[in-house]
Image (tube, rainbow, N blue to C red):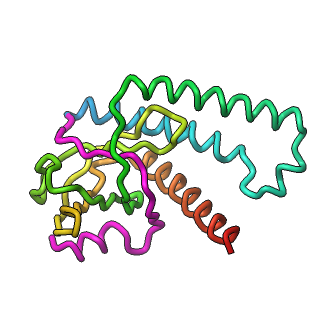
């Protein structure tokens, strides 16, 4: 598949976002039972993240309507979660920050030339992506390499999520919608 065809397959007519997140592509091909476990963990992570993010007001004006004691409690919980996350991350080597474009169908990620060789179309791998700076647990999804194109810093891989359950695809779409909505709100605030 050509890079342009892969771009269309992954990003045409769907919500897609471009963001910089810690991410790594691992040369792992999980078996069927591990895929189910990864899907279950990914769904739990996305549901928890949605619950936290949906419970927060998107606009600063809404903060004024909340009880001040509740806002203080939320701030304390945020600090505690951030502290625990940073303590857990100290034990691990951090994944490099990468700019990726992604949708519920897959992702496009740029890798340096010295990254592990996964350049063959059709290769199966695992995308590990940290969705939140405060949460130490990454989202791990099996991917299939659709296409590879040279880039100024190395090579760009087009990755299709491989055999995700419909419930996980729906949660990914919801997460990407919230991410896209926040990016639009942020750009409006900067004007």
Image quarter where the C terminus lies is: bottom right
The span picked out in magenta is: 1-30
Question: Where 84 falls versus 153 (above or below)?
Answer: above
Residue located at (18% from left, 38% from top): 28
Task: Depth check: give the residue in front, 19 or 143.
Answer: 19
Magenta segment: does it hold 93?
Answer: no
Does the magenta run of residues contain 6? Answer: yes
Q: Residue at x 32, y 34 (%)?
A: 36
Image coordinates of residue 86 in percent, x first then y, are 51, 29
Vertical side of 147 occupied by 143: above or below: above
Quarter of the image with the N terminus is: bottom left
- Whether residue 154 sits left or right of residue 22 in the image: it is left
Position of residue 145 in the picture relative to residue 120 (left or right): right
Residue 73, image x, y percentages: 79, 30
Q: Give the residue at x 42% y 38%.
A: 42
Q: Is residue 4 left or right of residue 70?
A: left
**Which percent across, then down, holds residue 113?**
15, 56
Q: Looking at this view, is 178 or 96 the one in front?
A: 96
Q: 37 and 131: which one is in front?
A: 131
Residue 104 relative to residue 155: left or right? right
């Amino acid at each position: 598949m050509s890079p342009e065809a892969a771009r269309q397959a992954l990003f045409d007519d769907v919500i897609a976002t471009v963001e910089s997140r810690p991410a790594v592509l691992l040369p792992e091909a999980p078996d069927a039972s591990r895929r189910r476990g990864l899907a279950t963990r990914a769904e739990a992570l996305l549901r928890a993240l949605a619950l936290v993010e949906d419970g927060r007001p998107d606009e600063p004006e809404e903060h004024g309507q909340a009880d001040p004691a509740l806002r203080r409690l939320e701030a304390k919980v945020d600090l505690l979660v951030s502290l625990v996350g940073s303590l857990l991350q100290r034990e691990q080597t951090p994944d490099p920050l990468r700019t990726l474009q992604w949708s519920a169908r897959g992702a496009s990620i740029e890798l340096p030339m010295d990254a592990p060789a996964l350049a063959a179309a059709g290769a199966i791998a695992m995308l590990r992506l940290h969705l939140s700076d405060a949460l130490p647990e990454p989202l791990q999804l099996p991917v299939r390499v659709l296409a590879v194109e040279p880039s100024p810093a190395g090579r760009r891989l087009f990755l299709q999520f491989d055999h995700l359950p419909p419930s996980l695809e729906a949660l990914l779409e919801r997460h990407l919608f919230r991410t896209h909505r926040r990016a639009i709100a942020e750009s409006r605030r900067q004007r």
